[in-house]
Amino acid sequence: MTGVAGPEMPDYGLGTAGLGNLYTEISDDEAKGALQAALQSGLHCIDTAPFYGHGLSEQRVGAFLRASGANPVISTKVGRVLRPAGTQPIPDNGFASPAPFIPEFDYSAEGVRASFADSQKRLGVRSVDILLLHDIGEMTHGAAHQEVFDQARTEALPEMAALQAEGQTKWIGLGVNEIEVCQQVLDHMDLDVLLIAGRYTLLEHAASGPFLDECHRRNVKVIIGGAFNSGLLAALDDEPLRYDYAEAPLWAIERVQKLRELCAAYDTSLPAAALQFCHAHPAVVCVIPGARNAAQVRQVVRWTQLPIDPEFWDALRERSLISPDVVVPS
């Protein structure tokens, strides 16, 4: 952290795992349409990663930036390097038709440099606004967590700080799906920003709310990803119900049904409530829902602007569907 001014963040941005063909293959034109609609709608923070489609998301974002000359806030990640697959089978990692690369975890200083250099080429940029260390934590690495954490703390994060000192990024931080590893890192060093996916949502926030309070006290900015919990809070009737990128457990499905029923009683939209809830906490500077095409982006924008009866939030508390002390939109 250098004290350099950070990027000017919009309230909402665009997560681009879907532009890497997460679950569903989309065309280059659909990806371009999503990016164009996002910037036209004021969602001018674009979050991507080498992992998304094994470089495909970054390639599509880069192609759009070159063709449009647009200059949004760009966030990408390090922690994996992409190796050409050659004749080896390509793991899909949940992505339909990913690019022909094999992602490998690498939290070494050299790996950070190599990953970032490759991202610069795919994106066609000399620097980014936000650089995040991707997917450290016990949820991802299991028994190897402590070894990964030690290398991240002693190699990856210092190398990211060096890139920041060189002017190649404005903010550095983590991009993760768990709160515990964020706390572990903050116990050792300060960070500019945390991208927390799926852990502070209308469905799930009891454990993360106090942590966000601490972030606010320490001036650590928070970006919320996964506001729909892998789509569960925005799923249509004919769509598969996912939670944490897998089949949704029964407890989550039952809780979402209760949320839907209360939304219906107050004539509001569950996806709208989910997005607006995430942005209410003062530590949160941006929420980045995903979208695969222009129509989905425009729907997201409508949800962010939908008026919601203040009594709805009181009703959620009364039914114990949100924590009693959690921050809600005012």
Image (tube, helix red, strand yellow):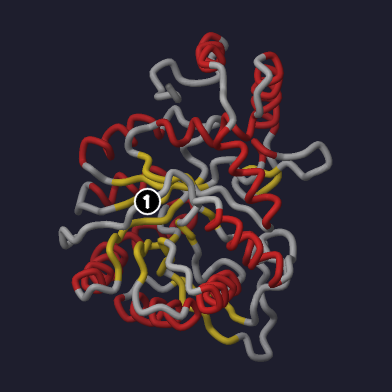
Nearest the eye: 325 or 93: 325
Q: Residue at x 63, y 64 (%)?
A: 19
User: Dot 1, how many residues are within 10 Å of its Cα: few (below 14), some (14-19), or many (20+)?
Assistant: some
Asked which quadrant contains residue 54, the reply is bottom right
Q: Secondary structure at mark 1?
A: loop
* In this rendering, position of residue 12 left or right of residue 112: right
Q: Residue at x 29, y 60 (%)?
A: 171
In the rendered image, residue 144, in percent from the top left (x then y), is placed at 42, 61
The N terminus is located in which quarter?
Answer: bottom left
* Above or below, 229 relative to 31: above
Residue 75 seen in the current view: no
Nearest the eye: 87 or 300: 300
Q: Residue at x 46, y 83 (%)?
A: 121
Nearest the eye: 66 or 97: 66
* Above or below, 135 relative to 91: above
* Above or below, 325 relative to 187: above
In the rendered image, residue 313, in percent from the top left (x then y), is placed at 52, 17
Circle 1 residue: 9
* In this rendering, position of residue 137 left or right of residue 2: right
Which residue sits furthest bottom? 86
Residue 20 seen in the current view: yes
* Above or below, 202 relative to 70: above
In the rendered image, residue 100, in percent from the top left (x then y), is placed at 64, 82
Disc 1 residue type (three-letter): Met
The C terminus is located in which quarter?
Answer: top left
Asked which quadrant contains residue 284, the reply is top left
* In this rendering, position of residue 291 left or right of residue 139: right
In the rendered image, residue 55, in percent from the top left (x then y), is placed at 56, 75
Which residue sits furthest left? 3
